[in-house]
Image: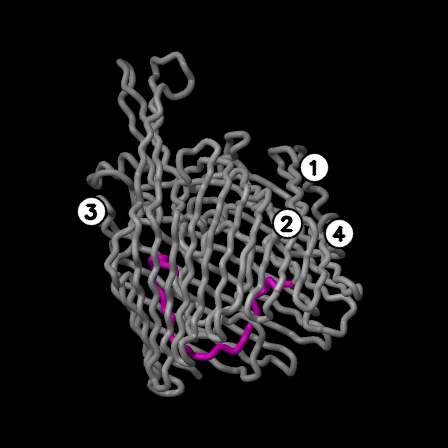
Amino acid sequence: MSKSFLNYMPVFLLVMLTAVNASAQQDSTNLKQEVEVVKAYEPSVSDVFKINDIPKIQDEKGEKPVFEYKISTQPVFSTFEVAPVQAAQMVGEPKAELGKGLLKAGFGNYKTPYGEFFFNTEAGRNSIFGLHFKHLSSHGSVKLMNDDKVDAPRSENVAELFTKHFFRRSALSTKLFFDRQAHRYYGYAGDELSNEEKEALFPYWNEQQAFAKGGLQFNLNNEEDTRADLNYDLNLYFHHFGTKTDQTENLIKLGTGFKKDYNTFEGLLTASVSYLKTDGIIKEITSSAGNKQQVLINLSPAILLQGDIAKLQAGIHTFALLDDDDDARLLITPNIKAEWSPVENMMTLFAGADGRLQQNHYSAIAAENRFVTPTQDIRNTEHQYILSGGIKGKFAPRFNYRAQVDYASIKDEHFYILKETEVLATSETTYQLNRSNTFDIFYDDLKQLTLELELYYTASDFLNFHVQGKHFSYSLDSLEQAWHKPDFEWRISTILNPEGPVKFNADIFFVSKRQAYAQRAVFDPLANIAGPVQLDKMNYTLSSYVDFNFGVEYQYSPQLSFFGRMNNFAFQKYENWLGYAQQGFNVLVGASLSF
């Protein structure tokens, strides 16, 4: 479409100042605050993490999770690599006691230094100010599945500044952030190769890559004001993202959310408008290098009816996407949620119908798979409908459960594959083979069925268990397999927090085998065709694995504690992405000082 729509961006932003926010994934019965705000943290069980992206328990202190169902087609953990465990979270509402600081430092095998600093304090009678810095890096080597031992360094650096100011009937939160993650393209599939062969065959072999993202967030809301006739939630988000391979991205999003009580029902309205510009990519539509610009508009009106044992939310999600290289797109999906509790606090039946337009901007894809080919331009994904239903409640006062079924229709889901090219020799040209250790994209439409079970049992005030499992079934239109996606995922976690100075936690993860794919296009310069004369297909199986992690903390004094964390204690050798083996057994030890 014409680029002239970009001239109207100021108008869109002005309009949205009087309208509403939130992604289609949010539960619009709550005006969700998107800005991360400061709270006084408490030194707790040190969940210092490893570098190799293993899923992990989030609740180190043993607090009972809230069993809120959500309609989602994404696994709880690792079809994609999961971000490392955070040592202490500065999110949520502030507590009464402020002015604390926390310094954590440690070191592990794989030459892994770790340091993290938190500080927050009252900055006036009604304001809070906080800082957070983190460094984690690993400089060791990894043995690939073909037994090739390669250097696989990785690092993460984070800097964040938080503020929150409480007005009489509202609160303003701000956040400045910078995050930089660096790694190398160290992996490859197939048989072991010499260093000379790898340099010749793989364009990105052992190349350094870095993802740097900085930005700001603002949030103004009065959702805690129960006397207000109208509750609102206003959000502004901006980030700039850049890579070492010269891709850049600028994203700005303005959103609002409103909730009003009309006596017999509540009116809900959420909306957002975002502007995205990405540069340094090969555009899919034109096959040319350059920049890509998009405007995404979302409007989601709904009504909410609530009774003593039941509630119903009914509405729609509307998405409009304007792209400077493509025709405008419109997607309308249901926004329906229902709950009925025939046995109060013991059993709740729920159902829903939802959908969303998922904007696959570059930084989101890089976070999902850091080994994707840097110049990729990935299509947006339409979740045309997501049907959900299940049951949740308690078997006993200390035993919570949730069982859920999701069925989703998804258009243009992306799957990561490896592409190679081979050019046959002629009397005038030499033979050429170009392999790849960065991932390209295949697309397909699919129907996905997800069965999920979650249990949480508090055996005592000092011991609890958490079990969560998912089974996935995929029906694709054209692809043979849902590449890199598992059929099963299970997680078992326990926390032992007895009286005394020592605390323990342990996690066990199981991920089923996954299928992966590489394709080699063979070209013959003498053939009278423009495309390849042959496509060679190579199927791979990524083995299932069980991962066992164990953590301990010793509280030496109210201010000083020592911690240790062992990961991949089962000594499993596995890949999350074809060709990229993860670290084996690793351990990190350190100390925490609060002040």
Q: Are marks 3 and 2 in contact (CB under 8 Å)?
A: no
- Distance (Cα) linking label 3 and label 1: 55 Å
Mark 3 or 1, closer to the camera: 3
Q: Name the residue under label 4.
A: 15
Say whether disc 2 or disc 1 marks the residue closer to the N-terminus: 1
Mark carried by residue 4: 1
Q: Mark 2 points at which residue?
A: 274
Q: How is the image coloured?
A: one colour
Would residue 501 appear left or right of 89 to someone viewing this image?
A: left
Residue 51 lies within the magenta run = yes
Q: Are marks 4 and 1 in contact (CB under 8 Å)?
A: no
Q: Do the residues labelled 2 and 1 touch (CB within 8 Å)?
A: no
Mark carried by residue 542: none
Give coordinates of residue 334: x percent, y percent: 65, 47
- Distance (Cα) linking label 3 and label 2: 46 Å
Q: Residues within 10 Å of mark 3 (few under 14, many from 20)?
A: few
Under mark 1, the amino acid is Ser
- Distance (Cα) linking label 2 and label 1: 16 Å
Say whether disc 4 or disc 1 marks the residue closer to the N-terminus: 1
Q: In which quarter of the image is residue 295?
A: top right
Q: Name the residue under label 3.
A: 147
Would residue 542 appear left or right of 451 to someone viewing this image?
A: left
Q: Quadrant of residue 357?
A: top right
Under mark 3, the amino acid is Asp
Say whether disc 3 or disc 2 marks the residue closer to the N-terminus: 3
Say whether disc 3 or disc 4 marks the residue closer to the N-terminus: 4
Mark 4 or 1, closer to the camera: 4
Residue 437, above or below 220? above
Q: Do the residues labelled 2 and 4 touch (CB within 8 Å)?
A: no
